[in-house]
Image (spheres, rainbow, N blue to C red):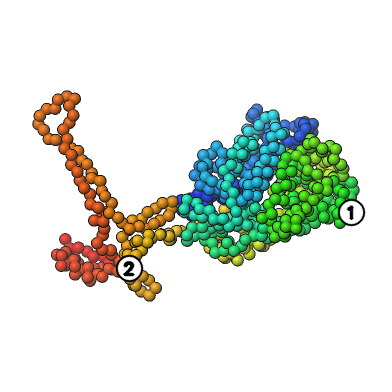
Amino acid sequence: MKLYCLSAHPNKPCIILQFKEVTIMLDCGLWAASVTNFLPMPLVPSQRLNSLNSWVPRDCSDPQLDGELKECGGRIFVDSSPEFGVPANNVIDYSQIDVILISNYSSMLALPFITENTGFQGVVYATEPTLQIGRLFLEELVQTVERSPKAASAKHWKAMQHLLLPPLKDAPFVKSWRHLFDAKNVAASLSKVQMVGYSEVLDVFGALTVTPVSSGYCIGSSNWIISSQFEKVVYVSASSVINPHSTKIDLTPLKNADLMILSDLTQTPLNDPDSSMNGFINAVAETLGRNGNVLLPCYPSGVVYDLFECLSDQLAQRGMANANLFFISPVADSSLAYSNILAEWLSGEKQNKVYTPEEPFPHAQLVQHNRLKHFKNLWASGFNEQYRQPCVVFCGHPSLRFGDSVHFMEMWGSSPLNTVVFTEPDFSYVDALAPFQPLAMNVKYWPIDMSLSAQRASKLIRDARPKNVAVAAIHLEPPVAAPHRIDFVIEADCPILPLRRGEVVTVPVTRQKEQLKICPSLAKTIRPTSVRPGVNLATVTSSLLVRDNKFTVNVVEDVPQKPIVIEKPLASGSKRRRGAPTAVQTVELMPPSIKQRKPSAYTWGTLDIDDLLARMSSEGILVAKPEPDSNGNCVIHLVI
């Protein structure tokens, strides 16, 4: 059993598991933090960004580099369409992948890079919410990047990375960064996904079975159970015990595995989700109280549902029920509608609302009462008529490099009355704001990450009792921001295998047994003999049929054998006329039937040395005295 780590970031996992000649990819996350090294892509031309000075390394005179890099606020940015960190493609051939298992919608954004134009012929499994919400993420990503195209593409700066300034100088694996795919590739990639349900057992070539179980992280999120007849691997991706709206995590199937693979633990161990939610609400209320505007860079699904629910309740309690809330995204209407028709994937409390009948999420009522207004973009019909300040705007992208959030940063950044609040943990708010400096608006960082902490993950390991644990190496050391916090380190009572990008890990799990099926007619002939208490043996002569990785033992039948025909020229001393056929003799050889080749006896047990010597002597074979060796064996020397 082997593991290949293809991801550079532990929260954007992409892991290859090879076992029983089956190659399985576990998630295919897209590392989007790379885009913070690029200049923003505003909806309208920005005089400030267009007037930035070009930057060239001091010891470089390559004219091709001119214009690719721009200096802003003491930092260097690439002036080009953004590029994303994709899974490593030089470790394994994507065409060899048999199955891709998707855990949640945020871990499938690199799927088009894996399945398109790579020779991939496997199958992708995901739950229905994962597929549908993942589609929304991909569609929004493609549309927001394509509507603000760059005139040129920078590609020479990567060869000069060692001459650049930090943080661009220290950016990891820049040569593997790639421009985003298009809508055609997204559609082709998603067409390969097959929807599955929780606890549904899926057969993989007869060698393994895979089963998704709830991880509790988000709507439709899954952990995966990968099993053979005698081995078990559990893949624990983004999981949560505190998410209020998704199905609770299913812990029972995770127990007693030969290998547990842990990924996508919390990115913000120093921030508690409840404290961050309170901080977010207070920041919004304070800004609205002074007639300021609030910008919430966010994804089109996920935590944003909780933000709608908590914020609307708290503003109503504080006498701000009439505050203007806007949700702007190319998929805003689909996201709001789809979240309320997935009752079977929600928590018990929200499922009960369906039978009241009520909407599971309160944002449906907010839309009905015109408290939450949603639009596809800033030029959508009705936006100008309903836009009022002060307001709270939820829009993408959290990186502040493309999407409507860039426009609002340019428009509101110069006023100290306004506030931008970061709640998504995928991006450093310092890096996101760098090209907008100097900035007068207030900045609040309240990341909300509901995935497992190191302490909860360690408890999960103790309760599940796996024989081996594989986890990203970064989780085996305290975070840089808190080197004294050893409680942020994964602990286990079993061997821990660290995962690093590009490395191959051999898992100490070996196949020792295989299950065989014996046909009934053969089973009737077996007569076991007791050799010691609890152990019975029987000799069997049979044929082994292997089909779809299933092994069946059948009775050996007499198979009619076709004669082997041998043709040889006739011996003749006469000369053959040119062009005449050669005279041949046909000889048919009939091989013995299969039953005739059955062994008459089987050897078993410990050899009796004295009996062997006596039999050899009776046959006239002269032997010297046997000599035992250091391994407990016996060496018999023949007398020649």
The residue nearer to you, when weighing 108 against 519, is: 519
Give x and y (percent) for residue 345. Answer: 66, 55
Residue at image coords 20%, 46%: 589
The quadrant in which residue 610 appears is: bottom left
Please state the horizontal and vertical placement of residue 357, each as a whole percent of the image.
Answer: 75, 56
Residue under pointer 2:
527
- Helix, strand or loop at label 2? It is loop
Where residue 43 appears, as percent x and y from the top left, is: 76, 34
Disc 2 residue type (three-letter): Arg
Rendering quarter of residue 160: top right
Instruction: Name the residue nearer the viewer: 97 or 71.
Output: 97
Inter-mark Cα distance, 2 to 1: 85 Å
- At x 57% / y 49%, what residue is drawn? 125
In the shown orientation, is residue 493 left or right of residue 441? left
Q: In the image, what residue occupies the spot 51% across and 39% down?
A: 119
Circle 2 Cα neighbour tier, 10 Å, few/some/many (<14 / 14–19 / ≥20): few
Residue 501 seen by the camera? no
Q: Which residue is mark 1?
A: 319
The residue nearer to you, when weighing 528 against 40, is 528
